[in-house]
Image (cartoon, helix red, strand yellow):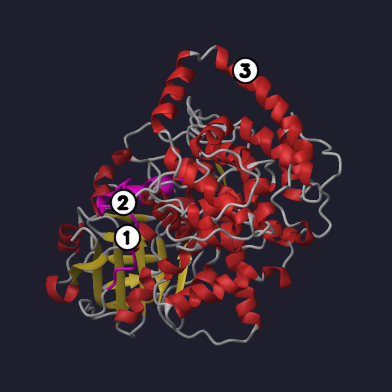
Amino acid sequence: MRIQSQICPLPDRQSKANQLEQNGRLVPLILSSVQRVRSEVMAGDCGVFVDWSQMGDVSRDAAPGKTEYKDLKELKQHARSGQWAKNHSQRSAVYQHLLKALPCRTVTPDAEVYRDIVGNSTSKRNPSAYPLPEFVDGTAVPQYCLKAESIGSVHAVISCVAGQFPDISHCPSLPAVTALMMHWSPDEAQCFESVSRMLACNEPGRRLLDQTFLAYESACMTFGDLVHKYCPAAHKLMVATATDVLEVYSDWQRWVFGDLPFSFAARVLDVFLVEGYKVLYRVALAILKFYRKQFVASNSAPSKQDSAAVRRDIQTFVQSIGKSVTPDKLLEKAFSIRLFSRKEITLLQLANEKSLQQKGITVKQKRQNVQLAVNADNFSSEIVSAKEIRDIWSWIPERFALCQPQLLFTTSTHGCSLNRFYAHCEGYEPTLLLIRTTDREVCGAFLSTDWEERKRGGNKLSFFGTGECFVFRMKPEMERYEWVIIKHPELAKSAQSAEDQSSVEDNGTPHSGETLEKPTTDSSHLSPFLSARHFNLNSRNTSMFMAGNVDSIIIGGGDGNALYIDSELNHGRTERCLTFDNPPLCAESFQVALLEVWGFKDAMGS
């Protein structure tokens, strides 16, 4: 049930909105002068909600210094280096300029709307008089060096936001963001306007705050996918210690906005308002890397425990991160991670959203438990155990890890025939190939694309697939080998086509085009994530993912094949290949004892 502001004259608010629309030409002129005056007042009036005894050497009264930037490169450099961290009024003025520059909906509630609805009392507010709305999912307001009585003001602002943004159904980061913005606001009304502009931003392809469970959960899945690729050691630790890895990763936004101490969160906000949502992914990945480093240093042996215990352990680490890491070090680590381009992350996010929609998650959906779907009671393989398949499942993209494994083909039942292999596997995407050799070695591959794609080349053996493919071995130690471009992005540059002018340079510095428009194609026909055609590859040998004809199937190419299996599914070989930069996955020449192919059944849908 949506909790409305307790003094919310909605009819008056609607008439005000209509009046704003009817006087569209005059209002911007009036508002610009009002905002200019308000900005000038703010420079000396911010910080009234702050407990200054906790603020260390931050200056409240110093002159603002530089607050307007025409050079985008200088703005980013100042945001990343903490140029405004010691000057409260300067940071306040910079934030107001950044937020006023955000493209927003035509009718976006402003400070005057808040004063009309709630008033702008400077007296102490009781938080219980302004209960937080359901969409914050039980998230409390962090103290963030605010006065104790200021928490009631944060509650009042969020309560008013709930009344003015009825479409928000899930936004657990709102309490933290509102508490942060309260620091640099002269009154509640200005804080309300700042938060409203963040929520109402309508720049194509840019979002600042997730406002639905669909967006929130797909962001969690996207973060999980990024952890797989950029923090493999930390991900391995999560798999070894947590019963449900996705549940642990669902806290990633709270680590950044909620658990980080104020001095860290403020520095993140500096960069977030300049560079956007991708910054949050970077910071959360850096947090996970530092957590893993601390875990290893403690000489603790990884042991499986309830996911809630792992979540508490990470939360405790983040809350006390200042004992081992400075804000500068955290951001330095975050921006040293060479993430995919903005386009690729957008495609991944959209693919995850589409997957959740297919499983029944809607924009209006309230929180729903989403977890890895491998059910040990229903799983039976002659090659790997239930524990091993769960470990393999932890490697695959999050949108498929929500599905149950479904046996499509096995040589023990369907025989050793490549034609029958194709007949049983065509129409399924992706698939998981498992091989046990006569020497009892086990290896395999995750294959992103339907085997039917091989027919596009006629009888000619031609490669297809995407960069989500990977190969692996189970013994002597479980090891995964991904597309070489993921670990060595210097081998390719993001393709700069007409519709992809806003991708990010390899060093993590955004181009002057700050946002990416969503693909114009229908979401049911999304361009594949990590498709080789999105990259200017130095050599085609680095994008040979999978191939097949009547004579053989091949996984990985370039100076060798990661896996080659003959037409009788009997003999094979494995070598180092350029696409996956893998060593031989087992004995270089082997005989197949058993081969299985698994598909991905929609567990949530069923």
Residue 328 in picture, x, y percent from top left = 75, 58
Q: Earlier in the sequence, mark 3 or mark 2?
A: 3
Quarter residue 52 falls in:
bottom right
SS category of the residue bearing label 1: loop
Judged from the image, the secondary structure of the residue bearing numbered disc 2 is loop
Distance between the alpha carbons at the discs numbered 1 and 2: 8 Å
Image quarter of residue 445: bottom left
Residue at left offset 64%, top offset 33% = 512
The answer to whether residue 557 is seen in the rendering is no
Q: Nearer the viewer, residue 305 or 424?
A: 305
Q: What's under tag 1, amino acid-wise?
A: Gln
The residues tagged by marks 3 and 2 sit, at their Cα atoms, a distance apart of: 40 Å
Would you say the residues marked 1 and 2 are in contact, meaning their CB atoms lie under 8 Å apart?
A: yes
Q: Determine whether label 3 and label 1 are within 8 Å by CB.
A: no
Residue 266 visible: yes
Which residue lies at the image location 14% right of the left edge and 72% below the top edge? 415
Q: Secondary structure at mark 3?
A: helix
On the image, numbered disc 2 is attached to which residue? 365
13 or 457, which lies in front? 13
Relative to 536, say whether 371 is above or below.
below
Q: Which residue does the image show at 20% across and 53% down from the upper left?
A: 427
Residue drawn 43% across and 76% down? 307
Mark 3 Cα within 10 Å, few/some/many (few <14, many 20+)?
few
Read off the residue under disc 3.
30
How far apart are the alpha carbons under marks 3 and 1? 45 Å
Q: Which residue is mark 1?
A: 368
Query: What span is in magenta?
Result: 346-374
Q: Position of residue 491 (x, y in %)?
A: 58, 50
Amino acid type of the residue that numbered disc 2 sits on in the rendered structure? Gln
Viewer-side label of 3, 2: 3
